[in-house]
Image (cartoon, helix red, strand yellow):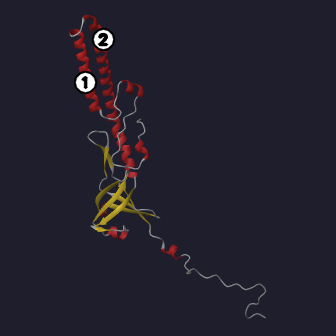
Amino acid sequence: MAARSSHDRDLPRPDLVTPLVARSNVLARGLSAPREPAFGTAHTQTLWLVLAALAVLALGQWAVLPPLRGPVTAAGVALAVYAAARTGYLVWLERRQLAFEPVWLAERSAWLRDGEFEILRCLVDGRPSQLTEVELDQADWIQLDFTHPPAGIERIRLRAKDVRVETRPGGMPTVRFPEARYGLQPSARTTFWRLGASAVLTLARPADPAAARGGTGNSPRPAATHPAGARRPGTA
């Protein structure tokens, strides 16, 4: 189970930070493990540690005074043991990370597909649109500009037949992408998204004409009443 990412509390965005798989903090600190999935850099650092250990061992054997050879050799051995332990830990951690990332990406992709983005601008067949169902039904292409955190704007062009329209009472028009998914950048430190070829637009439902007439004077008038004790016409 991975440590909870701070992005879990945000709305979907393209550049999520890839978390490291859960691990022992004590062991990670003791072996100077990376705090992000930058294993290439970590392995390079370990290689330098191995070379430093070999250099110290050689120095202990040939390049120092006899009384210092023991302590210098011991330091070289300790550095070599540390480098070997770090190498083994990094290999184990990297394998766990590789198993964790597809699961995490699948979870984030499901979260992305449920996300709704506010539409800033819409072009229908190259013309500005007010996003009405009738207009969209007669279109060939739809271009959407929508916003995502942090203050980003994305543009996508879709075939009108691949766009489904839903309505709700009031609210800003939004779009979601049922085929969207996340992928990893080559560095594996951040993500990118692919939004897919389909979308669902959610528009404000038009007001009910019957409800709009309510309270305008078109309702039936109440029957007339007679004062108490008054005679009805035609009665003696």
Name the spot of residue 52 as percent of width and height, x first: 25, 20
Residue under the image location 34 percent in, 38 percent down: 101
The quarter of the displayed image where residue 65 is located = top left
> Where does the N terminus fall, quadrant-wise?
top left
The quarter of the displayed image where residue 183 is located = top left
Residue bearing the label numbered 2: 74
Whole-angstrom CA distance, mark 1 to mark 2, is 18 Å
- Residue at far left of view: 62
Q: Please tell me whether residue 152 is drawn above or below residue 86 in the rendered image.
A: below
Residue under the image location 79 percent in, 86 percent down: 229
Amino acid type assigned to the residue bearing label 2 in the image: Ala
Name the spot of residue 163 as percent of width and height, x first: 33, 61
Q: Are marks 1 and 2 in contact (CB under 8 Å)?
A: no
The quarter of the displayed image where residue 26 is located = top left
Task: Work out whether mark 1 precedes mark 2 in sequence or the reverse, and give the earlier one.
Answer: 1
The numbered disc on residue 48 is 1
Q: Is residue 100 left or right of residue 234?
A: left
Q: How many marks?
A: 2
Crowdedness near tag 2: few (<14), some (14–19) or many (≥20) residues, C-alpha within 10 Å: some
- Residue at far top of view: 66
Residue toward you, 141 or 57:
57
Residue under the image location 52 percent in, 77 percent down: 213
The numbered disc on residue 108 is none
Element type at mark 2: helix
Q: Please tell me whether residue 167 is drawn above or below residue 27 in the rendered image.
A: below
Name the spot of residue 182 as percent of width and height, x first: 32, 46
Crowdedness near tag 1: few (<14), some (14–19) or many (≥20) residues, C-alpha within 10 Å: few
Q: Is residue 103 left or right of residue 49?
A: right
Amino acid type assigned to the residue bearing label 1 in the image: Trp
Name the spot of residue 226 as percent of width and height, x first: 72, 86
Q: Please tell me whether residue 151 is drawn above or below residue 231 in the rendered image.
A: above
